Image (cartoon, rainbow, N blue to C red):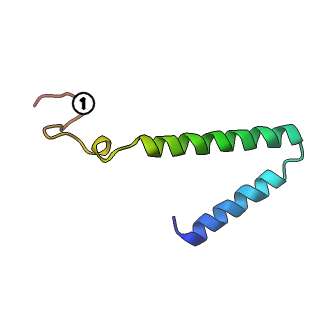
Amino acid sequence: MDDEGERRQELRLIKAFLSITDARKRQRILNLAEQLADDAASDTAALAPADVSKPDGCGDATGRVE
């Protein structure tokens, strides 16, 4: 995503968050966002270049033989 698109998304998120007046709901959203960020960071750290590529000979994932 480009910088301008990211900036718009950030502003939309902030605006939506600030419009929530219930402190308990805001805290739940904050906790969820932090958890998602932690999950994304651990997913990224767990991926190695070998995990991304397919082994030689892997073709159709359906298992069909033609």
Question: Which of the 4 image quarters holds residue 30?
Answer: top right
- Count of numbered labels shown in the rendering: 1
Q: Is residue 54 left or right of residue 29?
A: left
Q: Residue at x 77, y 37 (%)?
A: 28
Where does the C terminus fall, quadrant-wise?
top left
Extreme left residue here?
66
Q: Residue at x 18, y 37 (%)?
A: 58
| In this view, 8 is above or below 30 | below
Q: Where is residue 10 shown, x and y percent of the image? A: 67, 61
Between 31 and 9, the one lying in front of the other is 31
Q: Where is residue 46 shown, x and y percent of the image? A: 42, 40
Q: Is residue 32 left or right of residue 26?
A: left
Q: Which residue is mark 1?
A: 62
Q: Residue at x 50, y 41 (%)?
A: 42
Q: Residue at x 64, y 39 (%)?
A: 35
Q: Residues within 10 Å of mark 1 (few under 14, many from 20)?
A: few
| In this view, 57 is above or below 19 | above
Q: Is residue 48 left or right of residue 45?
A: left
Q: Secondary structure at mark 1?
A: loop
Q: Where is residue 13 shown, x and y percent of the image? A: 71, 56
Residue type, numbered disc 1: Thr
| In this view, 42 is above or below 8 | above
Extreme bottom residue here?
4
Between 52 and 45, the one lying in front of the other is 45
